[in-house]
Amino acid sequence: MLKEADYDAVLSKNKDSIQQFHMIFYYQDRILAQLNQLLKHPDFEKNDITKMISSDELSIVKSADNKLYNFSLDGKNGGTYRQRISIMHYTDLVSQDSNDIDPYLVFEGDGYNEIIMLGTDEGVKYVLTGNVRGCSYCFQTFVQLVSFENNTFNLDFEYSVVNRDWNDGAYYDHETKTVNVNYHVDDLTRFCGCDEDKQTYFEYDKYDRNQDDILCECKFVFNGNNFELVKDSWEKLELEKD
């Protein structure tokens, strides 16, 4: 490790201390290498990995059928973007040539909070939910529905919201099998509309305190195979008086 780091930008003049991010990236690579070895172990499916690894530093979420896993850890990138390093693993995936298309391309890069298995007429599908902080006041929430076919994952449904209010966003209610979306128009998301072809755009200036407060709402209900749009609306709210 020190041999690789032997240059002025990383080691101190006397080579008795090392730049912190070099150490962070070094140990992250070590962790990921060990994790990949663990996933390839022939006895991986015989054990409950969530009971074997209980570290707060490594988040592990899995589906109820113990087939789809997400491992994620803090990227420690030092900025206001709270990056997470994420690895997906599916036990039924057949190993492919390294030149083939990545079967996990449909998944978000910052990992997930939960993976929920759904039985459908088309076979098992998975709902995945997550969120990430992109800057001091930039919040993204997302819900995906994926299916596995021909040794790759297909993205059947996705809805994502990026805005400045951490109370807003896209969330999944498993009890009702509903994706509920509520957000206020701001400089990050200037439109309302659940259908990309039917969106209403609003002028927005984050420095103008007198502009209209617009609330957008969407609701998607699971119809047995996919999420179907059942509500698409927006309303103008009364401005709060100072």
Image: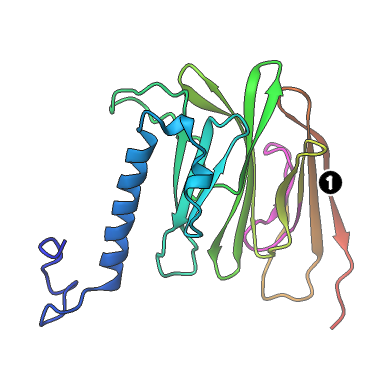
Residue with the most extreme right position: 238
Q: Position of residue 8 (x, y in %)?
A: 13, 74
Which one is in front, 209 or 38?
38
Instruction: Name which quarter of the figure residue 207 lies in.
Output: bottom right
Magenta span: predominant SS is loop
Counting every numbered tag in the picture gives 1
Horizontal placement of 34 versus 173: left or right?
A: left
Magenta segment includes 198: yes
| Residue located 72% across and 75% down the image | 208
Horizontal placement of 113 versus 230: left or right?
A: left
Which one is in front, 221 or 66?
66
Residue beneath disc 1 = 233
| Residue located 50% across and 35% down the image | 106
Residue 206 seen anywhere in this rendered image of the structure: yes
- In this rendering, the answer to whether 35 lies above or below 7 is above
Looking at the picture, the colour scheme in use is rainbow
Q: Which residues are magenta?
A: 182-199
Horizontal placement of 90 versus 117: left or right?
A: left
Q: Position of residue 129 (x, y in %)?
A: 63, 45
- Please state, as top left, top right, bottom left or bottom right, where the C terminus lies in the image: bottom right
Dot 1: element: strand
Which one is in front, 86 or 209?
86
| Residue located 51% across and 53% down the image | 54
Residue 109 seen anywhere in this rendered image of the structure: no
Which one is in front, 242 or 23?
23
- Dot 1 surroundings within 10 Å: few (below 14), some, or many (20 or more)? few
- In this rendering, the answer to whether 156 lies above or below 81 is above
Instruction: Name which quarter of the figure residue 4 lies in.
Output: bottom left
Instruction: Name which quarter of the figure residue 65 lies in.
Output: top right
- Please state, as top left, top right, bottom left or bottom right, where the N terminus lies in the image: bottom left
Q: Amino acid at mark 1?
A: Ser
